[in-house]
Amino acid sequence: MVESTPMPDFSCLMNGIFFPYFIAFAVIILFLRHREKMAMTVSILSSALVLISTLLLFSRHYALASHAESPLSPITYTVTWLYSTSVQFQFGYLVDSLSVLMLIVVEVVSLLVQLYSLGYMHGDPGRARFYAYLSLFSGSMTGLVISPNLLQTYIFWELVGLCSYLLIGFWWHKPEAAAAAKKAFVMTRFGDLGLFLGLLMLLHATGTSAFSEFGSLGLSPGAACGISLLIFCGVAGKSSQFPLHTWLPDAMEGPTPVSALIHAATMVVAGVYLLSRTAPIFLASSLAMEIVLAFGVVTAFVAATMACIQRDIKKVWAYSTISQLGYMVLAFGSGSPQASMFHLFTHAFYKALLFLGAGSFIHHAGSNDIFEIARKGGRRMTITFWTTVVGACALAGLPPFSGFFSKDAILLSLKENTHPLWYAAVMITGFLTAYYSFRVVFLLGRPQKVAHDDSHDSHGSHDSPPVMTMPLLVLAAATVLVGFWEGGFGHYLAGAEHDPIHLDVAIPATLLAFLGIALAASSFAFGSDEEGVVDRLPAMEIPRKKYYLDDFYFWVTHKVVLGVSWVCAYVDRHFVDGAVNGVADTVRWAGNQCSRLQTGRVQQYLNTLVLLFSILGFTLYLTVKF
């Protein structure tokens, strides 16, 4: 690698971050497909090596940033990959505060998910393949995070999409899993087409896709708006923004550790990370920022309403992820990329906690249904239950959990920089978030007993094995602690001073959260009703139908797309093929007719020649005479 910036040499650490996952994937696929324990060992060791390298990188880079008077300049290590007379494509690493923070998120969650999967996937015959896919998935996200330009980002962006397809459809023998994998792959392709067009437009306008040059591109507002909106198409697909969000709840058909990895550290947060990377282009167009803000607010609200009525615990957290991604996007649209990234950082830990907790419940109860989990003694799984409560508190934005600090920063940005209606909509969304979070908690915490004749009773009410509960405890501790690093996060990311909690924002938001919790308690803490106050509202029929988006997509694909395809096929068969086949048939008929003259009889040929010469002679005679 060639160091293009005279800064401390991190290239060795970057090699230790980038290569181990891909080496592990290759070793497992080529040599360890039938040796599951060795495959799992190789994958986990590679993840541990990457995390150690990441922590060393963070400690050295953070020490430099702490002693610097201004934010550190990005450090790039690149080699020329492709070049032409007008543009060069570089491949390599980018080290700055943003990439280092994202690496912390990706690698911590990836290692915990791999350790957790030892218990969750115990006995599954495809564990070697599963760990190979996990390694490739984590490596692809790592490559995306450290990419120094948009072209390299796009390559790993697509590789992450491929890995999500493989992992969502891991249990390929289940029709639902296969359909969910195809849906995720196809729907994200719509957004990725926009991202690809934005990349081409950027290269045509500027001749570069290097992130380090985005601050000095000098784009006109119109060009900046067009490129920004095309990039946002990719963000909307990958980060499940309305209306391209419908694939994410269906993706819950994959193994629960995959859900945690996708929702917390990879894939869906890649879109938010890309927004921060391309912020200079977006900030050059106020219209693009307003559109991003609008989509973020709509996504956050719509997904929160759908989370309020789900029975499947994984789908509650899936719609919650969509809503929280909306928070991150709207924070960026309000002009605060720092608040957006801080919420991404805190959300990664408590959402991984909630998904892994859900997996622990499902592993114990054998069901995704919240009521069934509660009936089989969910609240007696002490570690799983109470760590889920910690995650729910953070998700609801209660102090002193991490979600409180990041949501406070988002609300402050909205209040200061946007129209009051956007602020009010997000406050209402916060109320709904607290409601559905503690709806799950109160349902799981009901004091119900397991029937003596229940077949599951033989398993007892103990918690999941330590290999599954230890990651929960680590994530719960992170959920409590990382929010207090808000000041250090802001200083490290952007050199900004610590901004204290604003009571005029924090108090109303917290009161609304407690009001949502009280509503959930009144509906689900006691009794056996399966519907709460919110569930019985007539307006909730629309979220229950998923805002009719799946029905609309079904109509478009089966009526419009297939209808147009049938017309095209009919024209192709009867007109295009008919014309081509008609010419061929005419030539074939003419050939058949001419072939009859070839009889092989010399006498017939002589008679024909006599006849032809006779006609020619008679014609010549008439011509001369007259």
Image: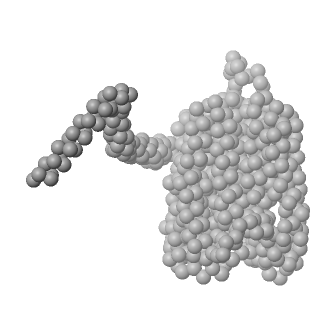
Q: Quadrant of residue 140?
A: bottom right
Outermost residue to the top = 453
In this picture, is 48 found above or below 65? Answer: above
Q: Is residue 417 visible?
A: no
Number of numbered callouts drawn: 0
Judge left or right: residue 616 versus residue 284.
Answer: left
Judge left or right: residue 202 versus residue 556.
Answer: right
List x then y, in percent, for residue 267.
67, 53
Q: Is residue 93 visible?
A: yes
For image coordinates 58% across by 42% down, the residue present is 182
List x then y, in percent, for residue 87.
66, 73
In this picture the colour scheme is one colour
List x then y, in percent, for residue 419.
51, 72
In this picture, is 61 found above or below 310? Answer: below
Closer to the camera in the image, 66 or 273: 273
Q: In which quarter of the image is residue 465?
A: top right
In this picture, is 203 found above or below 573? Answer: below
Q: Quadrant of residue 365?
A: top right
For image coordinates 79% across by 77% down, the residue present is 73
For image coordinates 76% across by 45% down, the residue present is 134
For image coordinates 69% across by 20% down, the residue present is 454
Quarter of the image that includes the N terminus: bottom right
List x then y, in percent, for residue 167.
68, 42
Closer to the camera in the image, 337 or 22: 22
In this picture, is 175 found above or below 490? Answer: above
